[in-house]
Amino acid sequence: MVTPDIEIETLAEFDQVVARGSLSGYRIQSVNLLERTFALLSADTSTAVFLGCAMEPDAAAKVRADGALVFPPVPDLPFDPYRGLLYTPEELFTGLPDGYEATPDAEAYAWFQETKSDGDVFSSMLRSVHDDAISDALDEHLAGRRVVGVMGGHAMARGGTRYRGAAELGRALTRSGLTVATGGGPGAMEAANLGAYLAPAPDEALAEALEVLAKAPSFAPSVSEWAGAAFAVRERFPSGGDSVGIPTWFYGHEPPNAFAGHIAKYFANATREDGLLARSNAGVVFLPGAAGTVQEIFDNATPNYYESRGEPAPMVLVGRTHWTEHLPAWPLLQALARGRAMESRIALVDSVDEVPDVLASMS
């Protein structure tokens, strides 16, 4: 039996459903209904759930009388805990010309810093509701897609050969029909999202983009200049390819990058980390990184080892010297995999050029 889609996330969807005369059983997420009072007064709203929907008082009273549950918007929050859709770079960086501190992304981080340790159960609940809504939106966005995760360090500066390599990887994976998903931050993550963004453009577009980005190689000392350079590239190449970034306000000093077409930003880093790896059903590529990337390797290896998510997903480590000498994660991964189903699903390669073919051979 196919479960009907009962979520309404846009005004257009609301208008389409309410025209049939009943909203009974639907979940309406963060839709501004101030101009839909007549429709609400006329429709059957029994057993409906309204999450963060602005309504006129008489409409709100009527739907409650019908038996609907109404969770009103929370005033004075820099984010919407009930949102039904993923973020976009334009949304998170609104107000960037006035400085990054004025953007919704920075304001949400400031709120998190103020409330994360104040012991207020209401603040904790709002963060949890928000993150659950983001997970729901992410699952809806990725439904039916083959997703490849690209992991790597945030310290990789624009303008270097490793950054370019990560961008070429993101481009190649996207052109092969995969959806690239990253941690959504700077460095290797941004580079992979950049490559995915430029996948529809001619090959020479990447060199032009890299030249623009190299003028602001890092988000320190100025996030505004760093993000501004990214938006300059987006303006130069406005019809970019889609990819997903999954960053966190837990690491608020790392801003999201502007090249992921859709951004699933979380307050809880553990939820974000596990969700990114779990949704990478076409495999995960690990570029050279430090402690965070090492953690991600073994966070991903554990369900592959126990097959708790089904058949092990491919894991490709890039950089033989890095992963066998500098941070020798590869020998331990090999030892874990020996004699198990995941043994044929792990690989170590020297360069990003080898990754697409290796992934294809394990699919």
Image (cartoon, rainbow, N blue to C red):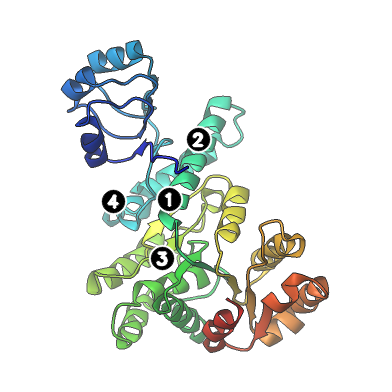
Classify mark 2: residues with Cα within 10 Å, few (<14), some (14-19) or many (20+). Answer: some
Q: Earlier in the sequence, mark 3 or mark 4?
A: 4
Whole-angstrom CA distance, mark 3 to mark 4, is: 23 Å
Reading the image, the residue beneath label 2 is 129
Classify mark 1: residues with Cα within 10 Å, few (<14), some (14-19) or many (20+). Answer: few
Reading the image, the residue beneath label 1 is 140
Whole-angstrom CA distance, mark 1 to mark 4, is: 28 Å
Whole-angstrom CA distance, mark 2 to mark 4, is: 26 Å
163 and 271: which is toward the camera:
271
276 and 142: which is toward the camera:
142
The image position of residue 164, as x and y in percent, is 46, 83
| Among the 4 quarters of the image, the one containing residue 227 | bottom left
Element under label 3? loop
Whole-angstrom CA distance, mark 1 to mark 2, is: 17 Å
| Among the 4 quarters of the image, the one containing residue 335 | bottom right
- Of the two numbered discs 3 and 1 in the rendering, the one whose residue sits closer to the viewer: 1
